Amino acid sequence: MQYYATVLAGQNDSLDENILWLSVENIQENNPAGTVISDVPDIPTLVGSGSSVGGVVSETVGASQAENPPLQLQRIVSRCKCEFFYASHDEASITPGLLAEAPPLPSPETLTPWEERERAVDVFTLMHHDLDVCTNSLQYAMILDILNNLLLYVEPKRKEAYEKLQRMRFQLQLHSQEDQRRPIQQLQNKVRCLVAKLRRLERETYLIQRALLEELCDDEERDGLLREMEDLEAQVLECKDQLMSESEELGMMISCYKETQLTAANSKLTNMRNDKPITTVRASEIVFKHAQWRLTQQDGQLGIADLVLSNFLYSKNCKSDDSVEHLLELGYIRMTNLLPNQTYKEVLVPTEIQSNMPIDRKRAIRIFCREKAPVGGISVKEHFEINVVPLTIGLTRKFYQTMLKFCFPERDPENIEDTERSVGGSSSGGGTGSGGGKKGSTSNKESNFYVAIDDVDKMKERAEKNKLFIYIKIPEVPVKLSYKGNKEKNLSDVRDFSLIIPTLEYHNVTWTWLDLLLAMKNDSRRVILSQAIKQKLTINRARNLALAESRQVPAEAEDKAKMLFGSALANAETTRHQPFFKK
């Protein structure tokens, strides 16, 4: 399998966009050992990148002269081995012929008292062995979108019903409590009218059917009654569909209205009454053994950083109460700075991994997140925890700003200090507005994926960006830090300082991912700065003491020599150190 993506966004984001189709030569696997010069068909094959990652698929060499040239396709993942595993426990998924080959379930008698019998669930696993990846910021966002909406998808009908419910919630939030009753009453009257119309049509259909059964009419009247009956049946079906749609909308509207009326005590009591054992209903996994990932600039060619990842595991478990558990584990990570004229090339690497740890638990990074059902359209992160091994970090200000632009292209790294101050001031309070992010939400977009939306869609988009974090914990991490600012000499410059990032905990905060990152940065920098100043003062004090001792030792030796040999030695030393000048 190999992956392709456009380098830049299209102009109108339509399905009939002028995107170059892949040829058979790009899709099928070629044997490099059996290729000779006479077999090469054209010049683009000679000067092209072949099947390597990052290569651009093009029919021409150099700039295109066409008025509407096709969008360039870039190979973002080179040819690799990919395996899909589906484990389904539905009765319809097993053919009768293979039922005899299925292993029997363990009997309860064979299980020990401490072994808990797990409930079988449907599992989907996507496994890559070796990956060679090259993406810019837009392609990186596309990969995340594919993972969320394709591989880890939710059933379309369930997703559509959930989106309707979310939109209904936002529509009711635009009105006051008194105004919320008016559309409900109007919809109730409409449903009553549809019910009355349906009963009338059914009564007319019954009367016509009764007249046909009595056989008191001639053939012409009978044909007319049949045509009328077919027309009535079509009206009945149409009325039933409309009634079902309006009833569903009315049910969602009443449900949303009740949610707004419930107090916190009543909702807590309801949850206690409906307490049921929570079980896993579906699981998804993404695994790869080793990956080399190059992050590039917007053009897809100039490199920003090289990432080496190994033993990657991401699992997603969907629970019966609509909650989701996410787990991400990474065995090894190494990041190299590719920007020119940088002081530190090694950005991130584990300092040490204990050798006595079991192999299956040797993890450099572990991220766990338990996500509850959204409230008011805002995602609720009940528990969010990050565990990291000791790290060696070599960072520059320019690299930090470039990576911020890569991960959050809608924000300007130069003007992000305002957001840092707003997040830092609200980290202990419990909420942050993401108002700092409104400044460049529409005017600074570099792609044309955004269209005019109404107030409800704006509320939905804002709610999707914000997350309610009930509890966040990042245990303390020993780091060996080196940092270089933009200027030649900076007060914040450090080199090989052994510091400890303290344990960070946050409770009941509403943040975006960028707000969380900035809060972690501000709180860590506040503590690390004090540690770095202490280390700088300690180093300077030790250096001054060493210089003082080195000066004091020759003076003490000279005093001892004067006491033993008298002033003759002092005169000889003075004569020996006199400079020689030639006249």
Image (spheres, helix red, strand yellow):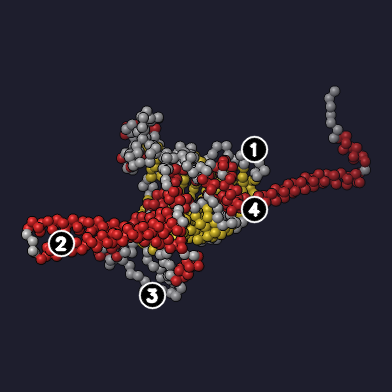
Res 322 → quadrant: bottom left
Residue topped by disc 1? 488
Q: Does dot 3 land on a helix, a strand or a loop?
A: helix
Of residues 229 and 277, the one drawn nearer to the viewer in this rendering: 229
Residue pointed to by mark 2: 208
Q: Identify which residue, 400 or 357, lies in the foreground.
A: 400
Q: What residue did someone put label 4 on? A: 527
The Cα–Cα distance between marks 2 and 4, rounded to whole angstroms, is 85 Å
In the current view of this chain or complex, which residue is farthest to the top?
A: 583
For the residues bearing labels 2 and 3, Cβ distance under 8 angstroms? no
Q: At label 4, which amino acid type do we have?
A: Val
Please give the name of the residue rendered at 33% of the width and 64% of the height, measured from the top-left corner. Answer: 89
Which of disc 3 and disc 2 is earlier in sequence? Answer: 3
Q: Which secondary structure, mark 4? A: helix
Q: Amino acid at mark 2?
A: Ile
The answer to whether 358 appears left or right of 45 in the picture is right
- The answer to which image quadrant residue 210 occupies is bottom left
Q: Nearer the viewer, mark 1 or mark 2?
A: 2
Mark 3 vs 4, N-terminal side = 3
* Labels 3, 4: front one: 4
Q: Quadrant of the C terminus?
A: top right
* Disc 2 versus disc 3: nearer the observer: 2
Real-space Cα distance between discs 2 and 3? Answer: 63 Å
Separation of marks 3 and 4 at Cα, in angstroms = 54 Å
- Closer to the eye: label 2 or 4: 2
Q: Residue 222 placed where, x, y %? A: 10, 59
Residue 16 position (above or below residue 426): above
Q: Residues within 10 Å of mark 2 (few under 14, many from 20)?
A: some
